[in-house]
Image (cartoon, rainbow, N blue to C red):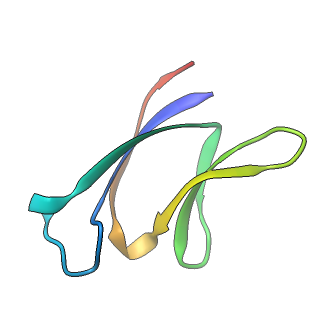
Amino acid sequence: MKRYRVVYRPNNQASELVAKTEEVYADGWRVDTDKVVLYQNGEHETRVFDVLTARVMRIQEIGTR
């Protein structure tokens, strides 16, 4: 499992100054129609975090577990 740092705007009107940062353990990430989804694989794929594509500023892999 990998650790990702996701930096995103909490709403559409927010600037970079109010960006939020979440650290999420996931096996990978992908872009769905309107969201960026971080997921874990197992018997079934499980979403562990998602955010609207327009709000994502950066996704950085910062390590493995």
Residue placed farthest to the right in the image?
Answer: 43
Quarter residue 43 falls in = top right
| Camera-side residue of 48 and 33 | 48
Q: Is residue 48 above or below residue 55?
A: above
How many marks on residues?
Answer: 0
The residue under the point 27% across, 65% down is: 9
Q: Is residue 14 above or below residue 38?
A: below
Return the x and y of residue 18 as percentages of the image width and height. Answer: 15, 61
The residue under the point 65% across, 48% down is: 39
In screen coordinates, is 15 left or right of 61?
A: left
In screen coordinates, is 62 left or right of 18?
A: right
Residue placed farthest to the left in the image?
Answer: 17
Q: Is residue 32 above or below residue 65?
A: below
The residue under the point 21% across, 58% down is: 19
Return the x and y of residue 37 as percentages of the image width and height. Answer: 58, 59
Return the x and y of residue 26 as percentages of the image width and height. Answer: 60, 38
Q: Quadrant of the N terminus?
A: top right
Q: Quadrant of the C terminus?
A: top right
Residue placed farthest to the top in the image?
Answer: 65
The residue under the point 18% across, 73% down is: 14
In screen coordinates, is 20 left or right of 23?
A: left
